[in-house]
């Protein structure tokens, strides 16, 4: 064995990434491999239980688990993966508080970045539809539901009130059905607390492109689920899909329009941009892997799994993108990385689905386990037992069980946990001598001086040279943003300064929608370039 441990880099901290790290921690000793996991959050989300956050039957932080505790021997980096260079074996990670990107080399790479909801080509969905994947999505939706109920209670006119009490979910797969079931239960159980809503009907609509909901399950179970949901007042529109949306209504392919203020979309999904940019063989956009889950052309070095990978069984069947498969794939990847590092037989991924389970809320579920179909209360009990068992760690198991018990005894929480959403544009104060940014830093903001003065300094032949002094009303930082290069000067406050900071995303938005705004900065950058 070599002296240095091999560098294993895992991208993504979902089911696929976290379980790969956990298995590797068991299989390899620290002197054999150093494991690093990169994820944009420092927690792992137990997605199958995420819809329960809507009704509050599980507490907000009990549906997630800190990755540092789940993978104690792995080095967690809570940042965004910005670029993967397979040829140079290098991964670029976003800047943190300090505006410098990090670059990491690896011996073995595991790509497990999942997928994202993509509203491309669906006008108005970006602005008006809520995705449902992350803890933040669940919190935003819960707060939004409470908000529309509060508004509906104040609203006198029947039309706007009906609109406020209409809830539309696009997508009738597992997540869409579970989200709607929880949402419906929540609205039903809290409506009684609103004096004017008690006797008002609310409307829940699922829009599904296929001819039945739950395509992941057998037709009998899907029909059962459909019957239960319809009995509970959920409207199911089949063979149609969301086409567009405004702040007032959802617009369907068929031309039908549903006035609403709540639109959730669990479809369609796409690969994260960093994977879309990746130069390798793909199948329907997903990373194509062989039966050992190695990336084509990078065998023995790069593995891909989970929702971002296109995986087939040795018999050629497509493996569905579910949590239970991601966990099994993680075991295969870990065995194969260990075999590459210390020698041994590689494993082949065999998908043996134990079954599928879907909750319909309020004591009902559908399950298909080892060929046996179950529905109703028994399936719901089974759903809860199995998912509780699968949640790693006693701590979370006990907390969730306690939440469920309390939810049976008491009505759901109705307090809104509002968080103020600030625009990215913000003010900042600098004292004389403070450095605003360094030459060589990544340019991620433009600055407008509201008060004070600063010096522009350039490194020339090892010493610092004063290039200019900027005053109130002047701008700086535009060059790096417009040219996408590193900062070409250091900015230091000469006198106390108040500045307006415009982050890259806002700067680009303003530039696109107000051309004159962009022209000012382009002309300035050009003048400064010539002067340099
Ligand atoms: C509401 C809902 C309910 C579900 N219910 C079930 C169920 O009951 N049973 C079941 O089997 N499956 C269920 N699924 C599907 C299951 O959750 C997914 O198949 C599974 O999570 C896939 O795991 P993954 O690790 O591939 O991706 P993910 O879990 O999506 O993990 C990807 C991770 O990568 C991170 N990431 C992505 N891009 C970047 C980047 N550029 N930089 C840094 N980090 C990044 C993300 O933040 C995330 O943590 C459900 C899904 C949803 C949304």
Image (tube, rainbow, N blue to C red):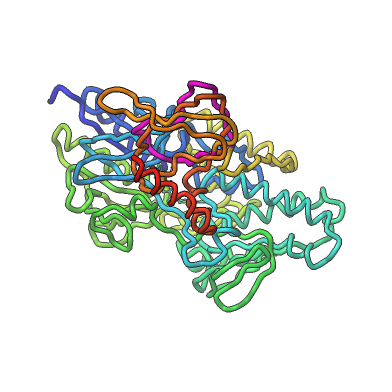
Q: Which of 460/235 is in front?
A: 460
Q: Is residue 380 visible?
A: yes
Q: Is residue 55 magenta?
A: no
Q: Which quarter of the figure is the N terminus placed in? A: top left
Q: Residue at x 34, y 39 (%)?
A: 486
Q: How many marks?
A: 0
Q: Is residue 395 left or right of residue 291?
A: right
Q: Is residue 389 above or below residue 494?
A: below
Q: Which of 185/138 is in front?
A: 138
Q: Position of residue 184 (x, y in %)?
A: 68, 56
Q: Residue at x 34, y 45 (%)?
A: 530
Q: Is residue 374 visible?
A: no
Q: Which of 331/13 is in front?
A: 13
Q: Which quarter of the figure is the C terminus placed in? A: top left
Q: Which of 237/225 is in front?
A: 237
Q: Is residue 442 magenta?
A: yes
Where residue 243 sits, quadrant-wise, is bottom right
Give the farthest residue toward the front. 531
Q: Position of residue 27 (x, y in %)?
A: 26, 31
Q: Residue at x 24, y 35 (%)?
A: 105
Give the farthest residue toward the bottom. 254
Q: Position of residue 335 (x, y in %)?
A: 24, 38
Q: Which residues are magenta?
A: 427-448
Q: Position of residue 505 (x, y in %)?
A: 48, 48
Q: Is residue 272 left or right of residue 400?
A: left
Q: Is residue 390 left or right of residue 23?
A: right
């Amino acid at each position: 064995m070599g002296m240095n441990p091999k560098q294993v880099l895992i991208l993504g901290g979902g089911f696929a990434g976290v379980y790969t790290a956990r298995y590797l921690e068991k299989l390899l000793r620290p002197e054999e491999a150093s494991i690093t996991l990169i994820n944009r959050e420092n927690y792992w989300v137990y997605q199958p239980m995420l819809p329960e956050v809507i009704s509050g039957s599980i507490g907000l932080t009990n549906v997630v688990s800190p990755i540092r505790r789940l993978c104690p021997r792995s080095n967690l980096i809570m940042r965004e993966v910005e670029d993967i260079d397979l040829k140079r074996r290098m991964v670029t990670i976003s800047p943190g508080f300090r505006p410098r990107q990090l670059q990491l080399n690896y011996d073995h790479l595991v790509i497990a970045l999942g997928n994202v909801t993509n509203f491309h080509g669906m006008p108005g969905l970006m602005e008006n539809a809520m995705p449902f994947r992350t803890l933040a999505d669940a919190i935003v939706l819960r707060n939004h539901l409470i908000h529309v109920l509060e508004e509906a209670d104040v609203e006198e006119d029947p039309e706007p009130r009906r609109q406020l009490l209409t809830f539309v979910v696009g997508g009738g797969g597992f997540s869409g059905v579970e989200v709607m079931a929880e949402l419906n239960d929540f609205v039903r159980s809290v409506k009684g607390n609103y004096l004017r809503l008690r006797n008002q009907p609310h409307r829940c609509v699922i829009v599904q492109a296929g001819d039945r909901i739950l395509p992941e399950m057998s037709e009998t179970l899907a029909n059962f689920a459909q019957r239960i949901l319809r009995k509970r007042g959920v409207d199911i529109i089949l063979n149609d899909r969301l086409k567009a949306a405004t702040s007032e209504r959802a617009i369907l392919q068929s031309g039908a329009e549903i006035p609403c203020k709540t639109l959730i979309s669990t479809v369609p999904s796409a690969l994260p941009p960093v994977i879309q940019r990746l130069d390798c063989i793909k199948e329907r956009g997903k990373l194509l892997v062989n039966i050992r889950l190695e990336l084509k052309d990078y065998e023995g070095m790069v593995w891909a799994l989970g929702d971002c990978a296109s995986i087939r069984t040795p018999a050629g069947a497509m493996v569905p993108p579910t949590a239970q498969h991601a966990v099994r794939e993680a075991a295969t990847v870990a065995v194969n990385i260990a075999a590459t590092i210390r020698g041994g037989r590689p494993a082949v991924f065999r998908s043996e689905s134990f079954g599928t389970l879907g909750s319909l809320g309020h004591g009902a579920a559908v399950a298909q386990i080892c060929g046996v179909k179950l529905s109703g209360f028994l399936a719901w009990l089974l759903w809860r037992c199995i998912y509780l068992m699968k949640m790693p760690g006693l701590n979370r198991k006990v907390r969730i069980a306690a939440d469920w018990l309390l939810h049976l005894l008491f009505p759901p929480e109705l307090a809104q946990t509002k968080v103020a959403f600030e625009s990215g544009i913000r003010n900042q104060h600098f004292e004389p001598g403070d450095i605003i940014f360094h030459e060589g830093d990544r340019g991620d903001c433009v600055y407008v001086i509201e008060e004070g003065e600063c010096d522009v300094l350039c490194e020339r032949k090892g010493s610092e040279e004063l290039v200019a002094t900027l005053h109130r009303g002047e701008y700086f930082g535009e060059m790096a943003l417009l040219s996408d290069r590193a900062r070409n000067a250091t900015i230091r406050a000469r006198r106390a300064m108040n500045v307006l900071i415009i982050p890259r995303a806002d700067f680009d938005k303003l530039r696109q929608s107000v051309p004159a705004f962009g022209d000012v900065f382009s002309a300035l950058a050009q003048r400064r370039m010539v002067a340099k």
